[in-house]
Image: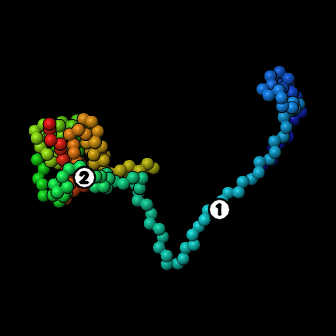
Amino acid sequence: MTRRKLTEDEIELWRKVAKQAERMHPELPQSVHPTQLPKPKPTKTPKARVDPFEFGQTAPAKPSRNSLQPSVTDRLRASPVQMDAKAFGRMKRGKIKPEGKLDLHGMRMDTAHPALVQFVLTAQAQGKRLVLVVTGKGKDRDEPGPIPTPRGVLRNQVPHWLSIPPLAQAVLQVTPAHISHGGDGAYYVYLRRTR
C-alpha cells in the first residue's frame, strides 16, 4: 500500500494550523509542513508448523463438545472428602440409605432454589445427616448454539447452590448418587450436625 502525497491545499491548511498552534516542545526544530513518515517495514509472519501426516496414522482426538471445564459430576468426584472416609465410601457405594429425598424434576430455577433451601435447612434442624436431591439428568437441547451450554440446568445449579450461603454452613459433602439412588441425576448431600 503506497501513501498518497499531500495536495497544495492540504499543505497550506497545515501551515495555517501550525502558525496558530502553541509548540509543546520548543527546543525541537520547527518544520513548515508535515514530513512524510517512512514506509512501515513489512514484518515476517511465522509460518504455521504442520506436522507431517502419514497414511494409516490416527488423527488426534477431537475435544468434547463442551471442553471448557470438567462436568459437574467430575468436579464433585475430584473434590476432597470432608467427611469420614469410611462413611463416604459406604455412601458412594449406595450402602447408606438417605433419610430424606427432594425431587426437583420439572421445577424451574425460581421454584427449585427456595425448595432446596427449605428442604436442606429443615433436614439439618431435624438432625438428619444424609439426604438425596434428585435433579434429573436434563434433556438435550434441540439446537445447540455457539455458546456451549451444559446439559441439565438444575443438575449444574444444585451443587453451586449447596456451596453458597445459606446452605454452605449446613452442607459437609456433596457427591453424585449411586446408580440405585438415581446415579448422575441425583446428589447425596451429607449434612453437618447442628451445634
* Disc nearest the viewer among 1 and 2: 2
User: Residue 168 appears at what percent x and percent y?
Assistant: 25, 39
According to the picture, the residue beneath numbered tag 1 turns out to be 47
| Amino acid type shown at disc 1 | Lys
Nearer-N-terminus badge (1/2) = 1
Q: How is the image coloured?
A: rainbow
Residue type, label 2: Val
In terms of image quadrants, where is residue 13? top right
**Residue 14: percent from the left, percent from the top?**
84, 29
Q: Residues within 10 Å of mark 1 (few under 14, many from 20)?
A: few
Q: Nearer the viewer, residue 43 or 14?
A: 43
Query: x%, y% of residue 3?
Result: 81, 44
How many numbered marks does the figure carry? 2
Identify residue for label 2. Answer: 81
Residue at image position (80%, 22%) is 22
**Element type at mark 2:** loop
Check disc 1 and report its element: helix, strand or loop: loop
